[in-house]
Image (cartoon, rainbow, N blue to C red):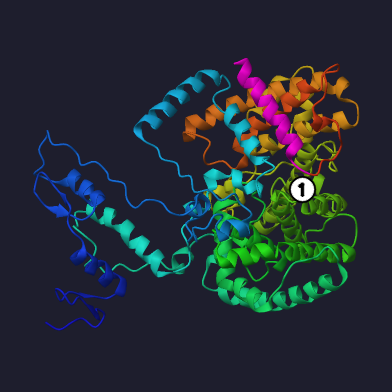
Amino acid sequence: MPVPANRSYSCTACGKHYARKNHLSRHKATHDRVSRYECHGCEKTFSRSDVLRKHWTKCPRKHDNSQLPQPVRGRKPKSCEQCARSKVTCDKAEPCGRCCVRRLTCSYARVRRDASTAKTASNKSSQLGDEESDGGTTRSGATFLLSLTNPKAATMLESFADDDPAALPDMATTSSAEEAFLRSLDSFMMDLGYPETDEIDVPFPSGDLISDLPSPVFRPEALAILQNKTEPLIHDLHQLHQSLAAYDPCYHTLFDRPTAKQVLAPESIIRFAATYFHLSHHHVPIVHRPSFGSPHTATTLLLAVTLAGALRSPPRDDALSVWAMARLFEEYIFLRLADIMSTYPGTSLSLVHAGELLETLQAAILLNNVQFMDNNIATRRRIRTQRLPALVASVRRLGLFAMRQSTAAADWAQHVQEQSCIRIAHWTAMADWHQSIMFHMPPLVTISELTGDMPGAGAAWDAESFLTSEGKDCQPEETSAQNSLRSVSDYIRVLMQDSIEVSHVAALRRVSMSNMYLIITGLSCAIVSGHVMSTIAESAPALERALRRWQDVWKFLAQSRQGACGDLAGCGIERYSDGQCWAARRMLESLVPGDEPHAFFQRVGHDTLAEFHGFLAQQQKKSCSST
């Protein structure tokens, strides 16, 4: 029988032919493996226990009283915990090389969960359930805040354990990735009744599968678009690097042009963009995904998304190289913002030809957040004293803090630009308020000037047009025309009033959970601002009333969300809003006259998170001891 032209690999043991070399390798392994696992029903043998367990569920000859084969532990772990989480090779040194580069704590102590440990954890969980009278969310929010503010961590990103980069498949088409895909196919094919996949020619998923995602950067034509943008960009970065190295004594970044050309290649940008939209976009939804990667996308935004995606990627060489250029990217983006603002006419924003300006502002916010996450004193000082004031001044000059959405925007592009302005304004305020709260410093953005509409729903923001189901619902209920409350300023004012009207209660119950996060952050910042301005004693009763009301609304919304979706797992960082409320109430209680203030309140403007983390740890300890 002639061998098909597309099956050029043959097994020397049995003569079977395969189209792919890795298929042949997997088949050859079946000749070498010893079938150590036997089905007690049909006496068929298997070389893997998990395959036997899959077979057991379908075996027609199994007995009702037969025991299901127990799973057997595989290879013992050898990599350190950080490398194992990121699924990268580890040199097994103490500390390993990758942990040294990433400035992480290298540990080889692996967690082993046996039955007794699981039982103990279950009992402990049930006991905690009685203590969590707030619906079971405040304790997790406080725990997240403690993890986020850990001063010993290299970056705040370590606290986002539920967004572990290990959960993201490596998009690089390598033989190991292909093997992993084919191994995962075994279980699926067995469910369909196939004994094994050795004889099935399964194509490995390529980058073509992401071409249908709602973003131009994932379409085939993006390669040519990005190539045209990155070539002059690398030249500009090289020129900027030479200038900074010559005139800035604080600049110590290394820049190698061939390396930059490699890590900023179109394929790398696409991979990092996929990581960003997968792991970070839902936390800070400021980039309009359906238009990202088009020929009109600003190079500043490409750089910011690339860096943000690299920081959430496994620590391979390309990601590490991008991390090392963070300072250079920061300089490039904020210099470009200064250039645009210096030539921009007027004191208000005109949406005509404002695309590059808006995307550069988005890039500046992303860069500010990325650098803010780094627990480095010099970086934090530079962000606090240079970058954030420049960002706030630009947004204020353009009038974005008072931006309102058109009631009937017939043009989708106009709607996207208006929503971009609204999101830029609010996430600029959030960046400022986060710094104010965590480092005990006066805010740059006041609540009274944030009078514009609040951001719309995330699903509508990611829609491609009015024609989609998400795009039709592009205006949030809390900013509808019949609602008298439209801005963060409106909601905070109402929450602090002596009494609330019935219409305002209904309006509060329509606020999205992401906008509830904006409100509680503003209230927390008001506490810090009141303390540093010595007005907290007069405003404390109104703030305490607002926090209590906010918590009632949050419980209502959380229960509604859990009833509809099961949990809050689909939310971004707003799912920890209850923790922000817990911290705000503890700050307010600690500032009662007569009590000795914590070290966090004894100085304006800290350089590290140690003081804020110490305050939170002290308050959590008090909460646990009182229960």
Please say if 388 is above or below 173.
above
Residue at position x 80%, y 61% in the image = 334
Please say if 543 is above or below 48.
above
Please say if 71 is above or below 509.
below
Residue at position x 69%, y 49% in the image = 373
Residue bearing mark 1: 428
The answer to whether 40 appears left or right of 399 in the picture is: left
Query: Picture coordinates of residue 515 (x, y %)?
Result: 67, 38
Q: On the image, which quarter does residue 230 sit in?
A: bottom right
Query: Picture coordinates of residue 281 (x, y %)?
Result: 60, 51
The quarter in which the N terminus is drawn is: bottom left
Query: Picture coordinates of residue 528 (x, y %)?
Result: 82, 32
The quarter in which the C terminus is drawn is: top right
The answer to whether 31 appears left or right of 382 in the picture is: left
Residue at position x 35%, y 64% in the image = 179
Secondary structure under tag 1 reads: helix
Query: Badge 1 local density, few (<14 within 10 Å), some, or many (20+)?
Result: many
**How many discs appear?**
1
Query: Picture coordinates of residue 615 (x, y %)?
Result: 73, 30
The residue closer to the viewer here, 488 or 366, is 366
Q: On the image, which quarter does residue 266 sit in?
A: bottom right
Residue 452 shows up from this direction: no
Residue 46 is covered by the magenta coloring: no
Q: Which residues are magenta?
A: 608-627
Residue 572 shows up from this direction: yes
The residue closer to the viewer here, 488 or 223, is 223
> What amino acid is at disc 1?
Thr
